[in-house]
């Protein structure tokens, strides 16, 4: 990596972190056209009968697994997983931000899209419409002659367009879009895993053709078999991935250009859940078998393996066990937009334990694949349930924790609920390893980690609100971070879920199965 690339990456990160130019947003209507191309789409192929059948089975599967698998065609399961991950789930006409999906987005504007590409080359490009779940050929792209067969080996790309967010977000717009892309990538990883197609997920992917105006931030390569045993070692690009966790679950990141700086987690019993249990449950693929069958490769700056993903999904789903996958995803919410973090009802560390466990599991899955000791997770709670006293604890990827530290209240850091988590990064090693791709690798990964906390909150009957627009220097000071470490993303847990005349939305299968219960409620008949 050249010095010029490293300098550019550091300058860009500093600008969106410490030199933000965000101003109050006065309207969500801006520009010459509406930002979401779905509002202008006219053509599209509806889901075929086989995909609708797979979608009905996928929605009904237990949130905790096992996968549907079986004799259903892999192409049908892949399309079903994409539809369930990205689709609009409900509309709140009385709220300021009315559109809701299974993952959060700034002001509900959704700057991330799913594109399906052939396993190799650029023969076609299909976009999954989040409103209709139809597959739209993009910019005159042809439709495969045999869509089901073609989609069985498709690459799934999460690409973002930050121009959908209001200009008032300024230099923060690109990182906000990348964070959202990571949230979507985690949701898609979950649905693919429950569809028996657990993917390898590559952040800042290499050589992915996407439509003009979009930036690819994640590539998911679904696998077609059950996962192999824990400890499988894979080679991605030119870097061997026999990465052994260090004392805190991290390994050294080789530096270089292209795919030379790529590593992938070799799943071990000490990381996110137990990959062996996931394999026994049939929730993911064998990487070796996938390579033999010619499935698409996933290469990028940072790659999380299928078995690591299955382990994180198992941890995040614990609170939702016994609930259908559809109802679990329906329950994901940040809460009503007018709710105040400071006045939120108290959530104890015990009540939010599943959220914390999911975040730690996701951090453990990511740590071996990134520059060593550059990601940090802190949990912030009230001390003795006293509003004025807060303490922070660093949570390590290996399950350990540091000592409690007081967190004084200052002007900007007052915006907090009784339970929160902060992801921080030492960005210098990322800039040295990945250069211009550093932020495209980092921010989607942070969103990916945070989404597992959002999903665990939904399973626990809680809501989780991500936060990015704050004063990093103040939070770094009260958290006692080192001079090179920046608080890059936060997730605040709240008890009030609330509704604003929520209306469920389902353009494909309005009611394919009875509603299951989640924490004593039926989310589909009383959506969150």
Image (tube, rainbow, N blue to C red):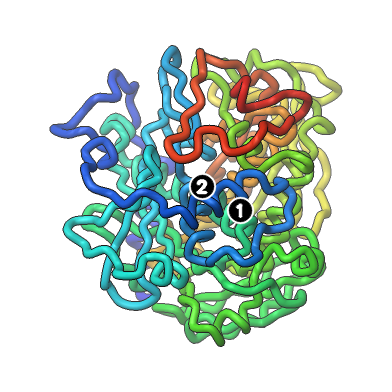
Q: Residue at x 59, y 44 (%)?
A: 451
For the N terminus, give its image quadrant: bottom left
Per the image, label 2 sits on a secondary structure element best described as helix
Viewer-closest of 341 and 28: 28
- Count the numbered circles shown: 2
Q: Residue at x 65, y 65 (%)?
A: 70
Contact between marks 1 and 2 (CB within 8 A): the answer is yes
Eyeballing the image, is 505 above or below 190? above
Q: Taking 358 as reference, is 505 left or right?
A: left
User: Residue 259, position in %: x, y?
Assistant: 44, 79
Q: Residue at x 25, y 58 (%)?
A: 211
Question: Dot 2 surroundings within 10 Å: few (below 14), some, or many (20 or more)?
Answer: many
Q: Earlier in the sequence, mark 1 or mark 2?
A: 2
Eyeballing the image, is 468 above or below 395? above
Q: Taking 461 as reference, is 185 left or right?
A: left
- As drawn, which residue projects farthest toward the front? 49
Q: Is residue 528 visible?
A: no
User: Residue 74, position in %: x, y?
Assistant: 53, 66
Q: Taking 217 as reference, is 228 left or right?
A: right
Q: Taking 122 as reference, is 488 left or right?
A: right
The residue that disc 2 covers is 85
Viewer-closest of 444 and 394: 444
The residue that disc 1 covers is 190
Viewer-closest of 244 and 273: 273
Q: Residue at x 33, y 33 (%)?
A: 169
Q: Which of the 4 image quadrants contains residue 17? A: top left
Question: Dot 1 surroundings within 10 Å: few (below 14), some, or many (20 or more)?
Answer: many
Per the image, label 1 sits on a secondary structure element best described as helix
Q: What whole-number distance in Å separates the C-alpha atoms at marks 1 and 2?
A: 8 Å
User: Residue 454, position in %: x, y?
Assistant: 62, 39
């Amino acid at each position: 990596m050249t010095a010029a690339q490293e300098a550019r990456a550091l300058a860009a990160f500093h600008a969106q972190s410490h030199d933000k130019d965000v101003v109050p947003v006065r309207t969500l209507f801006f520009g010459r056209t509406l930002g979401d191309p779905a509002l202008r789409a006219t053509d599209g192929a509806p889901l075929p009968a086989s995909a609708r059948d797979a979608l009905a089975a996928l929605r009904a599967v237990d949130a905790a697994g096992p996968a549907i698998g079986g004799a259903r065609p892999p192409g049908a399961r892949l399309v079903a997983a994409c539809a369930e991950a990205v689709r609009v789930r409900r509309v709140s006409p009385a709220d300021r931000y009315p559109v809701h999906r299974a993952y959060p987005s700034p002001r509900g504007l959704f700057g991330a899209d799913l594109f399906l590409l052939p396993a190799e080359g650029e023969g076609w490009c299909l976009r999954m419409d989040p409103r209709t779940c139809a597959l739209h050929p993009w910019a005159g792209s042809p439709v495969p002659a045999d869509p089901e067969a073609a989609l069985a080996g498709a690459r799934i790309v999460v690409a973002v367009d930050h121009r959908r967010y209001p200009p008032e977000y300024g230099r923060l717009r690109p990182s906000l879009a990348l964070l959202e892309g990571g949230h979507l990538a985690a949701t898609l990883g979950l649905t693919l895993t429950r569809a028996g197609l657990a993917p390898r997920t590559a952040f800042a992917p290499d050589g992915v053709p996407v439509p003009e105006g979009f930036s690819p931030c994640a590539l998911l390569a679904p696998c077609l078999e059950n996962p192999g045993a824990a400890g499988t070692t894979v080679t991605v690009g030119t870097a061997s991935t026999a990465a052994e966790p260090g004392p805190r679950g991290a390994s050294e990141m080789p530096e270089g250009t292209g795919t030379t700086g790529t590593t992938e987690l070799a799943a071990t019993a000490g990381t996110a859940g137990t990959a062996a249990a996931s394999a026994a449950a049939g929730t993911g693929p064998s990487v070796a078998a996938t390579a033999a069958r010619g499935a698409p490769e996933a290469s990028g700056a940072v790659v999380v393996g299928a078995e690591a993903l299955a382990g994180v999904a198992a941890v995040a789903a614990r609170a939702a066990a016994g609930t259908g996958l559809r109802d679990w995803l329906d329950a994901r919410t940040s809460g009503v937009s007018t709710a105040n973090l400071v006045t939120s009802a108290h959530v104890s560390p015990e009540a939010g334990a599943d959220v914390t466990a999911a975040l730690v599991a996701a951090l453990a899955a990511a740590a071996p694949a990134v520059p060593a000791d550059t990601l940090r997770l802190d949990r912030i709670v009230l001390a003795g349930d006293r509003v004025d006293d807060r303490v922070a604890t660093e949570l390590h990827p290996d399950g350990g924790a540091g000592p409690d530290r007081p967190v004084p209240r200052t002007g900007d850091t007052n915006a907090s609920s009784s339970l929160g988590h902060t992801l921080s990064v030492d960005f210098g090693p990322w800039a040295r390893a990945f250069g211009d791709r550093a932020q495209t690798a980092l921010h989607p990964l942070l969103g990916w980690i945070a989404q597992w906390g959002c999903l665990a909150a939904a399973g626990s009957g809680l809501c989780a609100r991500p936060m990015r627009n704050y004063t990093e220097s103040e939070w770094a000071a009260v958290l006692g971070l080192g001079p090179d470490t920046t608080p890059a993303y936060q997730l605040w847990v709240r008890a009030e879920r609330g509704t604003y005349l929520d209306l469920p939305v389902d353009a494909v299968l309005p009611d394919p199965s009875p509603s299951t219960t989640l924490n004593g409620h039926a989310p589909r008949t009383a959506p969150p």
